[in-house]
Image (cartoon, rainbow, N blue to C red):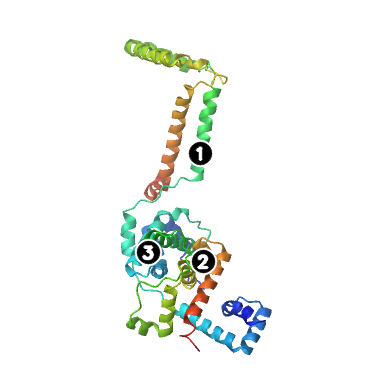
Amino acid sequence: MNCTQAQELLQDLLDGRLSAAQEREARAHVEACADCARQLAIYRDVFSALESEPLPEVDFADAILARVAAQPRAASVSWATWAYAAASLLVSVALWFAAPQNLALPAWAASGISKASEWAEPWLAPATEEAGAVVESVSSAADMPWTDWRAWSLDSLSLPRVPLMLVIAACVAALAVNLSVLRVQPQARRAAHLVL
Amino acid sequence: MARDELPTHVIEAARTGDAAAFRRVVERYQAGVFKLALRMTHSHTEAADLTQDAFLRIYRFFEKYDPSKPLAPWLYRVATNVVLNHIRARRSMASLDAQEAEPPAQVASAADATALGETQELVRQAVDRLTPNLRAAVTLYYLKELSLRDMAEALDVPESTAKVWLFRGRKALKDMLEEKLEP
C-alpha cells in the first residue's frame, strides 16, 4: 500500500469502516510512514473536535407552538380520495350513457309523481311554459337538440350532454375533496370519533 | 450514535396535531436544527428564524411522514430543505456546487475560543469556510442523530454522494488545519 492509497483510507480507519484486512494493511503503513501518521493524527484531532462540540442550548418551543396554533395544517388529498373521485366520475359517465330512454319507475313512484304533477299544475304551468320557450329559443339559436335529450345515443355524442355530465362530476369531486379536508382537520376528526 | 428517539405514541400524537406532543418533538430536535441552520447561515438571527420556519413546515406536513420509518431522517430532510432554500434565495445561487470556500460572516470571539477550546474553535471556523454542500454533510453527520444513509436522505442525495461530500468535507478541514494542528 502506498501513501496515496493509505490516505484515502484514513477517514474510514478512524470511523471503523474498514475490513479487518484493510485495517491491518493501513495501520501497518501508518506505523512505517511518518507523513501518513501525521495525517492520521490531524484527522483524529479534527474528528474529536467535531464529535465533542456540544449542541447549542436553545428554546424556541413557545414561539413555535404559538405560530403553529395560528396556522392551519395542509389539507392533503390522499390517493384514496382521488380514487374515490375518479370512480365517482366514471360511474357518473357510465350511468349517463347507460340510462335507458324510457326508465320504468315503480308503480307507486309513478302514481306519486303523477298526483304531485296534477296538484302543482296550476302554479307550474306558466313557469314551465316560459322555461320551455326559453329553452326552445336557445336550442334553435344553437341548433342543439336540448328538448330531445332523451333520444340521444352513444353514436351521436352530442356536445350538450357534456356540460351536465361535467356538472355531475364536479359536484362529486367537490364532495370528495370536502370530505378529505374534513378528514385531515384534527378537531373535526376527534369530533367524528366522539360521534362514531 | 443516535440519541434516543421519541416514543412512538408521542410521534403519532404529534403527527395527528396534538400540540403537547409536537412540543416534545420541538424540544427534542430544536438544538440540532438550530445548529444546522447556524452552520449554514453564520447568523444567530437567521438561524433562529429558520429553526422556527422548519418546525412550522414539519407541523404543516407531518401527516406526510411515514410512521413506520425513523423520524429523524424525515425531520432533518424538511429542515435541511428549508435552510438550503433560504440560502439559495438569499444568495441567488443557481447551484450550490461552488468551488470557492466561503468566509464566515461572524468570527468567533476570544471568549468563545476560551470556552470551546482552541482546537474546537479552529475546527468550527474551518467548517464555516466549507462550501454549502460539504458544510451541510459534515454538520448533519456530527449531530450524531443520523447514520450515513439517514444523512443522505436528509440531504436528498444518493448515499454514495453523501459519503463523497462527507469525505471531501473532512479532508478539506484536515487540509485547512494541517499547519495549525501539527502534532
Tell whether label 2 touches label 3 (CB within 8 Å).
Answer: no
The residue that disc 3 covers is B51
Q: Quadrant of residue A119?
A: top left
SS class, disc 2? helix
The verdict on a common chain for dots 3 and 1 is no
Q: Residue at x 48, y 22 (%)?
A: A161
Q: Amino acid at mark 2?
A: Met
Could you tell me which chain the residue with mark 2 belongs to? B
Q: Viewer-proximal residue, A34 or B100?
A: B100
Chain under callout 1: A
Dot 3 alpha-carbon crowd within 10 angstroms: few under 14, some 14 to 19, many 20 or more: many
Q: Position of residue B50 (x, y in %)?
A: 37, 63
* Frontmost residue, A191 versus A152: A152
* A145 over B29 or under it: above or below: above
Q: CA distance from mark 3 to mark 1?
A: 38 Å
Q: Position of residue A184 (x, y in %)?
A: 42, 48
Q: Is residue A196 visible?
A: no
Q: Quadrant of the N terminus of chain A?
A: bottom right
Query: Disc 1 to disc 2, how far (Cα)?
Result: 37 Å
> Where does the image place residue A125, in percent across and percent down from the top left?
35, 11
* Residue at mark 1: A84
Determine which residue is flagged by label 2.
B151
Left or right: where B78 falls relative to A57:
right
The amino acid type found where label 1 is placed reads Tyr
Figure quadrant of the C terminus of chain A: top left
Element at label 1: helix
**Is residue B87 at all visible to an observer of this figure?**
yes
B118 vs B35: above or below: below
